[in-house]
Amino acid sequence: MPKVAIAMAVFDDARYLALALDALCAQTFRDFHLTVHDDGSTDGSAALAESYAGRLPIAVVRGEHRGRHHAKQASWAAAAPSPYLMVLDSDVAPPPDAIGRMVERLDADPAVAAVSARTIAHRGRPLGPSQGFLERFFFEVNGGAAEEGRWIAGNCTMLRRSALAGLEVRADLGEDNDLSEKLRGRWRLLAPPDLVADHYGVPTTLGGVLRRFDREGVRVRSLVRAYPGARQLGNVARLVPLPLCAVALAGALLRQGWLVAACGAALAAYLGAFLAASRKVGAPLGERLAGAALFAFGNLGFGVGYCREALRGRTGLMREPARRF
């Protein structure tokens, strides 16, 4: 039995999958087995994964297309019953020492339930530098230079199987969010600041950014509904751009220039507050400004998703199946 079971769900991700699999081939720690669940891909993802059989200890499970959450849960269920379960997205490439370092931290401290890599958008992608800045800001808020944080990174994390025993993970909240809430009271969650993985599958268009933030808004509202204590000031602040832009639009339609100017000044102050809050994230000024602008723009989508989920009320709960370990 391998010490680490790696679970990966794939759907039409052949453009990034080879990068993730090549990164696993380069790992210095070799006592692992990879299970890939293909969610009915139409781009040859399953065949690409199968082509690595001579280079990786890998099993590829082909299934019908049922959606991301079903595929992720299916990959977890099919993975080997090893002491440690690593969940890795098919668009993330961890550094060569990642698995070894994660295993070392779990071996060294039985109070640690999860060790996450800090996944940062690849700089070579369109909008990559500004999205990477936002991801670094998230990890700064989550723990900064300290290893221990509030949340796990669900796209590249290693979990202690014994910590998962009996847990039911809700997909409607986001598996990583729900796991973090369930584990944090009894276990340590680590995200070493120097353990950084490349995230290739970030949106490359402004429309894609809006959709990504919209999904975050839905998950955050679902999380707060289930765990009222999870409400954070930072997520409340993310709702600000939507009403400001709505009022500015109304002012423009009513030809009330003062209202448009007031909203513009408030939005400028919002951007300034974000720049001040993110000053610990090392980046050139131009990158910080682009990140702040993308943050404000993306939060229009966040606000829409958050409000849409809030209007659904309790009827919106559990639209996706839970996963029991």
Image (spheres, rainbow, N blue to C red):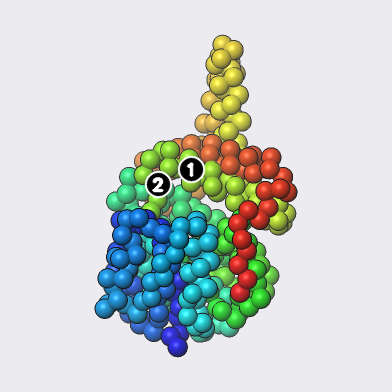
**Residue 203: mark in rendering:** 2
Q: Position of residue 166 (x, y in %)?
A: 66, 76
Q: CA distance from mark 2 to mark 1?
A: 9 Å
- Residue 324 placed where, x, y %? 63, 71
* Callout 1 secondary element: helix
237 sits to left or right of 40: right
* Amino acid at the residue labelled 1: Arg
Specify the amino acid type for callout 2.
Pro
Regarding residue 82, the answer to whether it shows in the image is yes
Residue 196 horizontal/vertical position (percent): 40, 64
Query: SS at mark 2?
Result: loop
Residue at figure coordinates x 55%, y 49% from the top left:
216
Q: Indicate the quadrant containing the C terminus: top left, top right, bottom left or bottom right.
A: bottom right
- At x 56%, y 11%, the residue is 255
Residue furthest front as drawn: 64
Q: Is residue 96 visible?
A: no
Q: Is residue 53 left or right of residue 283?
A: left
Please state which of residues 322 and 124 is positioned toward the viewer in this rendering: 322
Q: Residue at x 63, y 53 (%)?
A: 319
Quarter-of-image position of residue 56: bottom left
Q: Establish if 82 lies above or below 210.
A: below
**Residue 211, numbered circle:** 1
Q: Earlier in the sequence, mark 2 or mark 1?
A: 2
Please tell me how many numbered marks the rendered image carries: 2
What residue is at 63 percent from the left and 78 percent from the top?
Answer: 165
* Residue lying furthest bottom: 1
Horizontal arrangement in the rendering, residue 23 relative to residue 254 (left or right): left
Q: Are marks 2 and 1 in contact (CB under 8 Å)?
A: yes
Would you call the spot at circle 1 few (<14 residues within 10 Å), some (14-19), or many (20 or more)? some
Q: Quadrant of the N terminus?
A: bottom left
